[in-house]
Amino acid sequence: MEVGSLPVELWRVILAYLPLPDLGRCCQVCRAWRELVLSLDNTRWRQLCLGCPECRHPNWPSQPHLEPPSWREALKQHALATRTWTQNGPELQSSACLLFFRRRKDRRVWNVGPGCEFETLRGALGVAGPYDRVVLHPGVYEEQAEVALKVPVELVGLGRLGEVALLVCMEQQCPTARLCNLVFMPPWFSTVVYKTSWGHVQLDNCNFEGAQLQVRGPGTCQARFCSFSQGSSAHLLGVVLSLLDSCDFSGSDTASVTVEGPPVSERNWACKHLAALARTFPSCGMPGYNSSLKGPEAGSTGGPQPPAANVRKEHVSIEDWKKRTGVDAVCQGTVIEDGWSDGECSEGEEENRDEGGINNTKKQFTLDYKIPCDHHGLSHFLKPRPDGSLPLASSPDPPSVAPEPLTLQQELDRDPEAHMLAASTLGCILRRCLFRDGKGGVHLSNYGQARLEENVFRGLNYAVRCIQNSTIVMLRNEVCECRASGVFLRLSAQGLIAENNIHSNGEAGLDIRKGANPTILCNRIHSGLRSGVVVLGNGKGSIRSNQIYNNKEAGVYILFSGNPVVSGNHIYQGQAAGIAINENGRGMITENVIRENQWGGVDIRRGGDPILRSNYICYGYSDGVVVGERGRGLIEGNHVYCNKGCGVWVMSSSLPQLLGNYIIHNCMYGLAVFFEGEGREGQENFNEEGELFAWESDLDSEDERHSARRSISVALVESNCMSYNGAVGLYVKSSEALNVFANLVNNNRGPGIAVLQSSQQTRLVTNCILENGRGGVTVEKDCRVELRGNGVYENSGHGVSFSGNGQIVENDVVGNRAYGIQVSGSADIKVVRNRVQPAQSCGIAVLGAVKGVVHDNILFQGHPGNKKTLLHMDPGNESCVLRNNSILRHNTR
């Protein structure tokens, strides 16, 4: 018979009535018939799969609404899985044993139930031979004592699931057994309904109601499409390998699955078959789940690249940035209330404004001779690149690059230890299970091992608890709506947590404490009611390439001697700080993108002492980096830009080191140092399940990653670029000493550097301060400041306006619109060996009752159009001494 003799649609109607064996025979007729039978996937094969009493929906229990890729393939995999329990023969030597372990084609079937051969289960098991099938008819079977399985046997319930119930306690004493389509309820004398300590048990389509499954190594278990409800649980003690696939756990009073103890050294026959099943599991994500874990604005990269080269480019104009950040809106950053304002003008500035409006226009004079400034500070960063593009320090537009997070494969390629964990298959393997509406999900303790893949944890107190040197591997799970934290790791726990979706939990998404040291890669951790990741109590860990966003508190919170590596993450749109380091927290925080957070990008205070290096901290609704009271840390090589508050906000009681950062295009100050905090004193309460937490602080566990840090006793600001900020480049109102060395401060709207309060000495040394909107350096009354070796160039106001006490030594003050150096008030000052070249005003002006000396300075006229006095002192001032100053003018002949 040929297919072409009838329409294909009619053949499909005819074949839809055939049973499974006949469909198999039709496939063997010819290629055309085979294609015709395979085309019935969504009709007849679907009916056969869902109509099998031993088979549930392939995506049950977590996603039963999704169709499998192939119903025929799902039915085939179910049929193959039902035979796993008998595949143990080749390992044995004698023919008698081979016959014993091999599945017999002539095995007998025993029926149990009213009117059948046996009325009790115990009676049928007493006569059953190896690999016989015991069929239990609908009814309830109760045994008053423990039942022993002494030979391999298959127990199958007849009818639909729920029609056969067993109130028994069974102990397996044989190499293998299979139980299918049964409901287990605990008898009056025990909550354990099934236990094995050396054999293998396969459970298909069974329900456990208020009962406990117990497997002790070297025993093994494979459970498929089983339900554990009403406080039921599975306990695996020292298991080498067990597989729980597509199971439903609900209503547990404790943990639904408990894995305790290290895998025993002894192996039973089923280990290699379970290992083969573990390796054949597809590495892709759940249906409908994107394993690349893209967040709202995330992307991916093509291959492994160095962090600096692994970038995404976007062209953002200054107008686009203003629209994005809302510059004209009320700023949510640090609010400064004092008597000084950017809008005030001094005498020299008003004079020059009257003569030509120099402050608001481009320079009208070109100096015939100008002192070179290339050797000051970081001025070499102003030079165009070889390709003609402008560097960040001199570009009027915000940066247009941001690193992309690495993919999981890229992370595994560069981390052999994580790669080995991802490939491991020891312990308990849970796949595609649903944990819901109970106290706990999975609990590991005492060197236990488990692997969790594509499970859903929802509505629990906690999803996973891993303690006491246990090892957990979590891949592509969803952890949500837990009442406490989603994943707890304690007491030297370790493992790999990768490509999970962890969201909407009542506490932290991940909670790491007491020496736990996991590797956390490429997860989405978001929408939590507290922080995304919490590391405290000497917790460690490597937190890399995650997307952490939209959490109500800090994206990553490090405190109480927590010391993780936080690298390559995107932390954004949080309602607090992106990363918070408090209470002696530490950590290596590198190459992250921290953006669009409400309370600043990074918040360091109360003894926090991290290394913050090469991060992008941008577009925040407050300050970029906050170093609060008693904060410390090395802040090096970061890009801090386009934040609505300050770029970096530092309290004077802190002791940070700021080295080589780009602090640019922020709405307020570039770097602000204050003697009082602004009240961002959020304190998180990391209670676990409503109980007060406690930990032992191990003060001896210092980490070697801090050993290379330079020891300082004064806050240090060195080699930074502070450019294009909305107010002052560097604002100082401090009660502590401060060292400011070799920085580039340019093109800020306010003065380059403003020192309004400095009861201890502030040292400004070898900085390059140029083209700022309101002057170069401003020092207010009673401030103690030393200016030495700076270059102050082409600022719109005074080069240096000084009303405090200190020294102005060996500076180049060139091309500024107002006075070169103005000393006023009752200052006690030394102005020594400076080179001053104003654009069109006075070079050095001593105004008021100034005390001190002005000597050995060189003043250049700069332009023949400048007719002002280059060196001026108010008449009647007898407290200031002028001597040995040189004035060089143009030769007008």
Image (cartoon, rainbow, N blue to C red):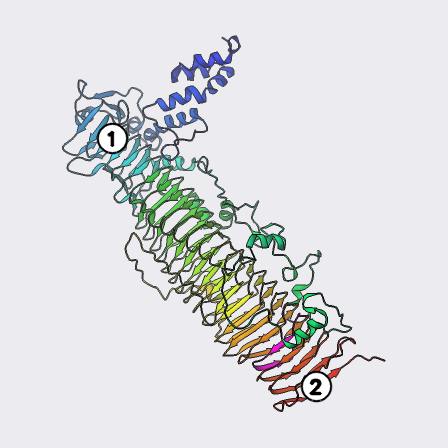
Magenta includes 801? yes
Camera sees residue 264 = no
Magenta includes 82? no
Q: Is residue 54 left or right of residue 550?
A: left
Numbered circle sitting on residue 102: none
Camera sees residue 347 = yes
- Expressed as whole percent of the image width and height from the top left, the position of residue 76 reads 40, 25
Residue to which mark 1 is pinned? 183
- Nearer to me, 414 or 825: 825
Instruction: Find numbered disc 2 in the image and state the secondary structure of the residue it sits on.
Output: loop
Residue lying furthest bottom in this view? 878
Residue 734, above or below 287: below
Boundaries of the magenta span: 794-811
Q: Which amino acid type is shown beneath numbered disc 1?
A: Val
Q: Which amino acid type is shown beneath numbered disc 2?
A: Asn
Residue lying furthest left in this view? 144
Q: Residues within 10 Å of mark 1 (few under 14, many from 20)?
A: many
- Nearer to me, 435 or 419: 435
- Expressed as whole percent of the image width and height from the top left, the position of residue 108 reads 25, 20
Residue to which mark 2 is pinned? 885
- Nearer to me, 670 or 283: 670
Residue lying furthest right in this view? 893
Instruction: Find numbered disc 1 in the image and state the secondary structure of the residue it sits on.
Output: strand
- Expressed as whole percent of the image width and height from the top left, the position of residue 280 reads 43, 35
Q: What is the spatial separation of the Cα atoms under label 2 and label 1, in whole angstroms?
A: 102 Å
